[in-house]
Image (tube, rainbow, N blue to C red):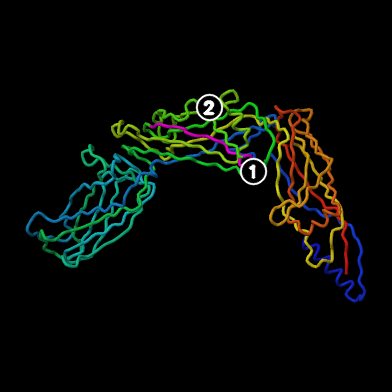
Amino acid sequence: MRKGLFTILLLLFVAVSCRKDGASWNTNWVVPIINDSLLINDYVNDSTLAINPDNSVQMIIDRKLLNLNVLDIIEIPDTLIDQELAINLLSLQVNPGFDFLNEIEEHLFELDDVVLLEARVRSGKAKIKIMNPIETNVIFTISLPGVTKDGLEFSHTQMVESGTIANPGVGELELNFKGYTIDFTGANGSLYNILQSRLKVKSDPNGPVVTITNQDLFKFQIEFQKLRFDYGRGYFGRHNLTDTTEVDLTVLNNIVGGNINIDDIDLELIIRNGIKAPARGNISLFESENTNQNSIVALNHPYFGQLMNLNPATGQWDGLTPTDLAFHFNENSGNLKDFLENLGSKYRVGYAVEINPFGNTSAGNNILYPNSRVSVDLVANFPLRIGVDNLIFQDTFAIDFKNEDKLLRIEEGKFVLDATNSFPFGLKVDLVLLDEGGNALKTLLTNGQISPAQANSSANGHVPVKEKMEFIIDKQAAKLMKDTKSVMVRAYLSSTEYQNNVMYSNAALKFILFGHLKLRTEI
C-alpha cells in the first residue's frame, strides 16, 4: 500500500510541478487492507485432525510428551585397553615369517551399576596403536573374541616397522565400530562388562633373522570413544525420571472470552514401557491455564499421584509390544469438560517414571531394542462437534495509513468486510484501530453480521454463506488514521446450536477487508 501511494504522489508532483498557485481536490479509492483465511483442512494431518468417510472432521491427537531411549541416559565412558606381550624365554632366535606370540586378555568396562552382557554398537570408534620393539618388521593381528558383525569376528592385521626398546616402531589406525555386537560375558560366558582381546605377532616373511628377549614388550592399545548402543542385554541400573512438561497453544491466546461446548470426548494420558525391564509410572498433574481469564483447571483422576507398576514390554525387535498404563477420560468422567472448555493456552503435565524400581530383579535380563522407548503420550480421538456462545476471537493485522509528505489525507470513508463463511458459526465483528503501542484509538462497529453455514442436503459438507459488513469511518476516525499502525479484528462467534454442531472438511472462513476511502489531495 505504501508503494502505491508513493507512485500516486510522484505522478501528482510531476503533473503540477510547474504550477505556482496551490490546489486541492478529492478522490475516491478502493484499497484492499487485509486478505486472510482460516481453513480447517490446513490442520488435517496424522496427528491433529482426520476426515471421516462422511467428510466430518475427527479430532485425532497423538503427542509424545516424553520419548526416551534409555540407552541415551546410560553413560559408556571412553575406555582405553592396553595389552603387553613378551616371550616366556630369556631369548629366542626368530626366523622370517615365524609366529612367536599369541595371547588373549580380558578387560573390564567401568559402568557403575550397569551390567552389560551383550550390546550392539549404534555409533562409536576405536583408535588403535601398535608398538614393535625389535629390529625387523612384524605383522600384528588384533582380534576381539565375542565382537562380531555379520557373523564375523573383529580382526585387523597390520605391518609395523622395526624399532628398538627405546624407540619402537609404531602403527596407528582408527576404526568405525558401528554395527558390531559385543559379548561382554568373557571367555567362560559367566562374567559381565568384560571385553576380550587377542594379539598375535609374526615376524616379517621378507625380513632378517633376529633375536628377541623377554625384555622386548610388544604393545597395543585400543581406545574406544563415544560408544553408544542401540541394543543391549543386562541390567541398566535404576533410574527415576521426573519432569513437568508445558505445552503452549499460543493460538488460543486470541480467544479472550465466551463459552465453548465439546461433545463425545475421548482422551487418554498413557505411560508406555517399551523396554524389557520392570517400571513404575505416575501422573501427578495435568492442568489447563487460560492466561486471558487467569483461570487454571486441574484435571482430576482417581489414580493421579500414585506410583503404579508397569510390566516389561513383550516380544522382540520389530515385534516389540509396550506395556501401557492408561489414564482414560470421557465426558462422563471427572471434570474433563470443564478442563477442555477452559480454553487454556498452556497445558502442564507432571509425570514420573521409575525404571528397575526394585533393583536388579531380572537377574541381568533387561533387554533394550532399537525401538525401545519409555514415553508419556497424550492421545485423543473424538468427532469435532462443537458449540460456541459469544466466543470472542481477536487477531491483529499491521497496516500504515501515515503519509509523510502530507499531500494526501483521509477525509472519510468506510471499511467493507467481504466474507465467505462455511463454518457452522455465525460472526459479529468489530474493528479496533490501534496505535504503535497497541493502544486502542477507536472501535468501529457495524450492524451487520456473518450467518452460520448450514449442512448441505447430503449431510457431508457446509453450504458457504457470502456476506458483507460495513464499518463507517467518520471524520473523527479519519483523523486517527495517520496514527493507526494496526487493526484488530474482534469476532464474536455463536453456533446455530450450543452442542452437536458437526464440523465438515470444507469448513473455512475467507475474508477481505477493503478500504473505501475519500482522500483529500493538497499541493
Q: Mark 2 points at which residue?
A: 328
**In the figure, is residue 225 to the left or right of 486?**
left
Q: Specify whether residue 89 is painted magenta.
A: no
Q: Residue, x 66% and y 33% (percent of image)?
A: 51
**Residue 403 position in % (x across, y down):** 79, 63
Look at the picture and state if 334 lies above or below 212: above
Q: Which quarter of the picture shows residue 254? A: top right
**In the figure, is residue 30 to the left or right of 285?**
right
Q: Specify whether residue 283 is painted magenta.
A: yes
The mark that comes first in sequence, 2 or 1, is 1
Look at the picture and state if 1 lies above or below 234: below
**Where does the magenta region start and end?**
279-293
* Residue count near mark 1 (Cα–Cα under 10 Å), binned few <14, some 14–19, many ≥20: some
Screen quadrant of the C terminus: bottom right
Q: Residue, x 88% and y 62% (percent of image)?
A: 520
**Residue 357 position in % (x across, y down):** 35, 33
Real-space CA distance between mark 2 and mark 1, rounded to the nearest whole angstrom: 27 Å
Q: Mark 1 points at which residue?
A: 253
**In the figure, is residue 127 to the left or right of 300?**
left
The amino acid type of the residue labelled 2 equals: His
**In the figure, is residue 423 to the left or right of 269?**
right
Look at the picture and state if 510 lies above or below 322: below
Does the magenta stretch mainly form a helix, a strand or a loop?
strand
